[in-house]
Amino acid sequence: MVPGPTAKDIHHALRIDESRCNGCVECTKACPAKAIRVRGGVARVLPERCIDCGECFRVCPRRAIIPVTTTYMDLTRFKYKVVLPSPALYSQFGPNTMPEDILQALLLLGFDYAYDKAYTCELVFSDVKKFIEENYSGDPFISPVCPAVTRLIQLMFPDLTDLILPFRAPREIAAKAIKSDVHKRLGIEESEIGVIHITPCLAKLAAMANPPTEEKSFLDGAVGISEVYGSLLGALKDSKAEKRDQPLHRSSGTGINFGRSGGEVAALGIEASLAVSGVKETFNILKAVERGKLRDIKYLECQICPGGCIGGPLTVQNRYIASNTISSLVKLFGRKLKVEEMTDLEEYDRNYFRLASKIRPQAIPALDTDTSIAIGKMRLREQISRALPGKNCGACGAPDCKTLADDIVRGLASIEDCIFVKSGLAGGRIAELKGIRKR
């Protein structure tokens, strides 16, 4: 197995404001990757485990977890600024606000061009369908669109990495195409063209700094939907009143539908497909794939956020209302792919959409580089785990007793961190725990 990046190579999209954090352990319990510990009364992120799903951000009662996004000052270094909104943005303002209104309003915020990423989703998945039909061999291909799912697989389901569809995410393909197009049309160097993604989630922020395979993302920054929402509301009033010389919205309802769970499956039109959303649901379905229980499924669309991107932690609108808005827009613009009416797909070599190299596992560090020592630590971990009280209270700073046992054998915690051991309330296990403690 080729080793993945080390912890210091990984850049995440959140930080913890220690002045707000009171060590309540809500985040440790919510994290599906068990990537957070409370140490010294403050939450700490283990970078090698974090998948940037944003679950900690959702549950923090003190708003101590802060997204690390691009500021408007960061954009001043670019000569030409392009904004690339997630299709989920179209769901945030109700069914009477058209995608064209939103794209035009983005120009009023200081961007030189607004690109309809939903159209790229249609374009890419026209090729994805051909790829699946030509390459399916019994195991389901897994969507590459949600970066939190990709990283979850890399860390916790490494044997499934070969099933991740070898395509760049639509946002990356769009950014790559935009830079090439602007350079050809306007003669501006690609290094002077900034492409900024408006994202519903933290995972897409992190994916720019830590792509699954590419050395560098084609995106230059990202801001959350919640950060631009207020400014967009004001700009929309002016946008709706302005006359448009050139329309910016190109996608059909199928492209807009990518903003929610099931959008990819609907675009493919492959009957043996499945769409799953939510942390637990995604985790459970990946377990089923790992056990060989989904061999009758050709394509698996997984999204960490409930309901898909419309349920992202950086969105504003209630996801059920947002889904209703998307339904209205899909009905209005129809499901017939716009790429069927154009020759756009023929302009691209197939490799344009494909990843240059395979997505590699990024396994959590082994207990020890020496196999015999690692086996001994595994046995000790099991012994500690059985001896701990199994309350899973989180008072030790780890999410559960099993994780505390792992931390102990890694030298990241001690048995005394368990309040039941420290207070002598571990029952019949206390003698065994004391014996372990003396080793």
Image (cartoon, rainbow, N blue to C red):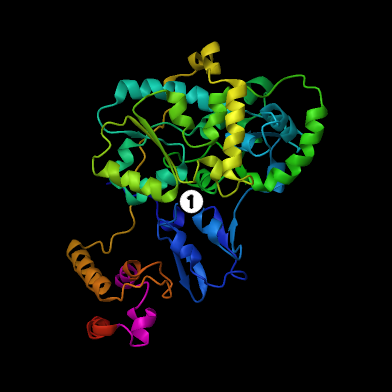
Q: Position of residue 201 (x, y in %)?
A: 55, 46
Residue 55 position (above or below residue 106): below
Segment tinted magenta in the rendering: 405-426
Q: Residue at x 24, y 72 (%)?
A: 386
Q: Mark 1 points at which residue?
A: 53
Along the line of sight, which residue is nearer the eye, 311 or 422?
311
Whether residue 191 is visible: no
Q: Residue most toward the bottom?
A: 424
The C terminus: image quadrant = bottom left
Q: Which residue is drawn at 40% across and 22% down?
A: 129
Residue 59 position (above or below residue 123): below
Q: Position of residue 48 (x, y in %)?
A: 41, 57
Q: Residue at x 17, y 64 (%)?
A: 372
Whether residue 44 is visible: yes
Give the quadrant of residue 433.
bottom left
Q: What residue type is labelled 1?
A: Cys
Residue 418 located within the stretch drawn in magenta: yes
